[in-house]
Image (cartoon, rainbow, N blue to C red):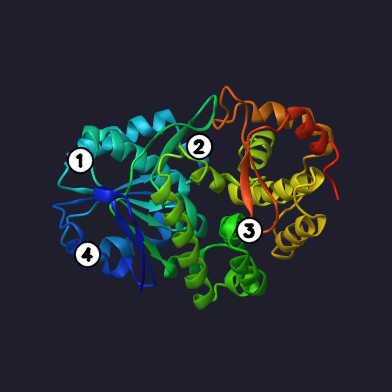
Amino acid sequence: MTSVPVTLGDRSYAIAIEGGLIATAGERLRALAAPKRVVVVTDETVAGLHLPALLGGLAGFDPQSIVLPAGEATKSFTRLERLCDALLHSDVTRSDIVLAFGGGVIGDLTGFAAAIVKRGVPFLQVPTTLLAMVDSSVGGKTAINTRAGKNLVGAFYQPIAVWADLDLLQSLPLRQMQAGYAEIVKYGLISDPAFFDWCEANAPALLAHDRQALAHAVAESCRAKAAIVAADERETRDLRALLNLGHTFGHALEAETGFSDRLLHGEAVGIGMAQAFRFSARLGLCSGQDAMRVTRHLQQQGLPAWPGDAGVEPSAATRLVAHMQHDKKKTSAGLPFVLARGIGEAFVAKDIALADVEAFLASDAP
Ligand code: GLY
């Protein structure tokens, strides 16, 4: 069993990484918090595959479950209100635990509901996708989407633990594995060139569900994220912002493709990271070889690496920049971009002219 600590004073917690965690959920809960009851929040897809096993593991805690529709549309004000009502109806108290059992949508929505119901009830993250295991379940960002954009209403609210049960990945489709992989390789690209080398050598095994490769990648990703979150929980320094590598370019592509299955979040981040490196090369910050190495690596894993791979042509450049104007990272000083001086050397640039971004996007094609 690997246990990665997230050190945040009295809000510290551990990320457990192992197979078989949900089957032993009851024992683990007893050791962790001994709650009176557990309310599981999940979606229809995960419920069909894994809910009976989790509820079996939780026998003795009188588990209740709330099953929501799968998909990004669930991260809405309407669903938040209904979830809060359902939690209040179940009479959840601060002695109970709300368990988020799903991917990023369920984790973000449930975490936000747990943060505001009765001004905060304890919640536990049990991610079921690779992306949620290595990114969204760790670090306490919770949110819903609004008409103005993604994740614009939310709270920082840390879980009491994260259980990354690697067995759950065995049923995850390849496309979802690839989307999660983009957030794994991100940690190498931000600050760990040796981990990027490891990714180049081991990505095919990882995507084929090799247990050792998955365990290593999830643990390394969680360690990297935990260190950043411990140092800059609320993104007030330029540290946590590094985790947004590929996200400003990527969010614009998600907006352009309607936040739909046409382009998954992890796929958008993949293209966005390749773009961040190609833009950095264009500005003379990093070598063209590094930018092409990143682009090629993503392509070799079956990920899109150019906007055109998602059907977004260079002629969309003006619209893409307009989407960026709604980015929540924008401040009165402008929009920060995570750029790179090389693989493992990402930094936050605050002086980027959007005209330069638009000129780059207008020519960003293979
Ligand atoms: N997903 C970026 C962060 O947690 O800060």
Mark nearer the viewer, 1 or 3: 3
| Relative to 64, 214 lies left or right | right
Alpha-carbon span between mark 1 and mark 3: 47 Å
> What secondary structure is found at the residue carrying circle 2?
helix
Q: Which residue has dot 2 on it?
A: 73
| Residue nearest the viewer, comparing 286 with 262 | 286
Q: Which residue has dot 3 on it?
A: 344
Which disc, if any, is residue 90? Answer: 1
Callout 2 environment at 10 Å: few (<14), some (14 to 19), or many (20+)?
Answer: some
Quarter of the image where one finds residue 5: bottom left
Q: Which residue is drawn at 40% across and 40% down?
A: 109
Q: Which residue has dot 4 on it?
A: 26
| Residue nearest the viewer, comparing 134 with 5 | 5
| Relative to 226, 82 lies left or right | left
Alpha-carbon span between mark 2 and mark 3: 35 Å
> What's the amino acid at mark 1?
Ser
